[in-house]
Image (tube, coloured by chain):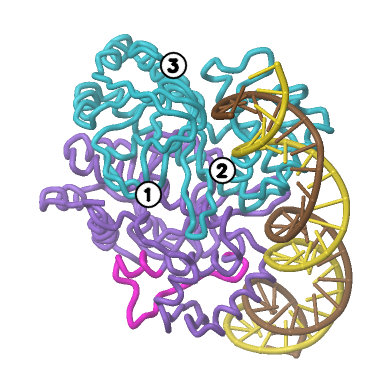
Chain colours: A cyan, B purple, C brown, D yellow
DNA sequence: CGGTGGTTTGATCAAAATCAAGTGAGGTGG
DNA sequence: CCACCTCACTTGATTTTGATCAAACCACCG
């Protein structure tokens, strides 16, 4: 299981994708009091309607944010990688309007709201960084709306895989043109608003283009350029540079 | 044309839907230096790729945030009412990843980033309020993803109209079970990911249920409960109360 | 009074959902 | 160690939803 140091390192690495951090900022983050908790795959980490008094930093593993409609169908809203704090918003938005669920076995480093408040009060640059993180989350939701509303099934899938490629790369989880993809076809369907059956067919078509190979929890990009083109992927909205 | 006082009053009223403001907060907001600019209906207020150095407070009229895909199709991401600051995020996210467009003739009160920074530095409660505003924006995008990904055409339309009803009501623009709806069927289609032709048919079906009357830029709720039910509308995600 | 942009209608088509049945791999208990 | 159970994946047939194509209609405006 991940240590507290690994947890803060993941956070720092993630923050540095999108923000400039000073050494003092890094030290301050390292000083955060954490409570590490392990979750099984598929466990519900936090639930719709709860009022958390702490934020959950994803230290190890992968998780999703999702919302369910009355008939039980699920929409996955975002996919979270190590270093993300999916419920950072709970600092200001007291009632949770969605669920967060482990995709794989996860380690969450919980940080009390009071500790986060103390941190960002002491270090304005981290306050900006955290605000920025939540704004980038929102930018991904916007792109998600475009994907769901205005792209075909094949484009949606290609776009999702393109986005993951960029994000995995940014935090060092893409090696050799491959990255972990711990999602079932059911999960993929819930992320791009399709049925699992249709995802299966679209995935086969995508494999046939030669752009990707998918299997055993891993995705291999055999022709990244083609994948990006198929998905109309333009990474501007990821704001993966402090000046953007 | 709206005055500076009307602009700040709209902002204060909007902020008070979701936040607790003290009298000092209100005075501080009233002291913001504004530059009022009128835009024609359909004018582009800010564009994808720009790097604004100021925020635009919607003082009068209605506007949408949208993003276009390469073939020219448009996805409307959010609808903005007086008091909203649609590009508040540009404080921390320097490059704009979408367009903001006037739906009706609009008056925008521009506020320099430096003035906003000064305001929120001086008044931490307003800093929280502004962060919270951007987080609520994000909550609406999430619900937008659910709508686009997991609801039928009829549900999507009913949900959109339900959401607008709540938001219009909160800022005092709903009277007599009616509120302004300055969107063409083309706009509605772009907001809920359908074609205009299909929106037309779904709208007719919705009228036939007796839940709403639509016409001449106005929507009248003849059976609000039914509309909410049709759209599976649960207002929790709007966070329209400082404690939520 | 003609143009323009929005709305409406009908006919046809395509994309994705649904229904129904397998297949296959990993994990568990007898 | 093997039988079987579960869950994911795959395939085919059919249906549904919403898109597309095409044409009118209508109101407002210059």
* Residue under the image location 15 percent in, 48 percent down: B25
> Subunit of mark 3?
A
Q: CA distance from mark 1 to mark 3?
A: 28 Å
Residue on which the image places disc 1: A97
The disc, 1 or 3, on the residue closer to the chain's N-terminal end is 3
Can you identify the residue that label 3 sits on? A13
Residue under the image location 17 percent in, 40 percent down: B123
**Same-subunit check for callouts 2 and 1:** yes
Q: Secondary structure at mark 1?
A: loop
Residue interval drawn in magenta: B165-187
Secondary structure of the residue carrying numbered label 3: helix
Front residue of A43/B221: it is A43
**Quick check: is B140 in the magenta stretch?**
no
Q: Position of residue A180 (x, y in %)?
A: 60, 22
Where is mark 2, residue-wise? A143
Mark 3–mark 2 distance (CA, rounded to whole Å): 24 Å
Residue at screen point 29% across, 17% down = A29
Q: Nearer the viewer, residue D13 or A157?
A: D13
């Amino acid at each position: 299981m991940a240590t507290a140091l690994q947890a803060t390192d993941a956070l720092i690495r993630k923050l540095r994708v999108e923000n400039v951090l000073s050494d003092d900022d890094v030290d301050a983050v390292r000083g955060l009091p954490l409570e590490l908790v392990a979750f099984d795959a598929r466990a519900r980490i936090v639930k719709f309607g709860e009022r958390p008094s702490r934020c959950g930093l994803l230290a190890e593993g992968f998780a999703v944010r999702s919302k369910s409609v009355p008939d039980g169908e699920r929409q996955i809203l975002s996919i979270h990688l190590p270093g993300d704090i999916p419920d950072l918003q709970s600092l200001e938005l007291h009632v949770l309007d969605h669920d967060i669920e482990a995709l794989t076995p996860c380690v969450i480093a919980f940080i009390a709201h009071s500790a986060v408040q103390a941190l960002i009060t002491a270090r304005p640059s981290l306050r900006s960084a955290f605000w920025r993180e939540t704004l980038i989350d929102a930018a991904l939701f916007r792109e998600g709306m475009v994907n769901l509303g205005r792209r075909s099934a094949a484009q949606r899938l290609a776009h999702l895989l393109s986005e993951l490629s960029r994000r995995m790369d940014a935090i060092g989880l893409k090696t050799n043109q491959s990255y972990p993809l711990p999602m079932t076809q059911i999960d993929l369907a819930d992320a791009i608003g399709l049925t699992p059956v249709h995802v299966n067919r679209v995935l086969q078509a995508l494999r046939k283009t030669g752009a990707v190979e998918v299997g055993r929890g891993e995705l291999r990009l055999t022709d990244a350029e083609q994948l990006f083109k198929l998905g109309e992927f333009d990474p501007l909205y990821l704001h993966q540079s402090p000046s953007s």
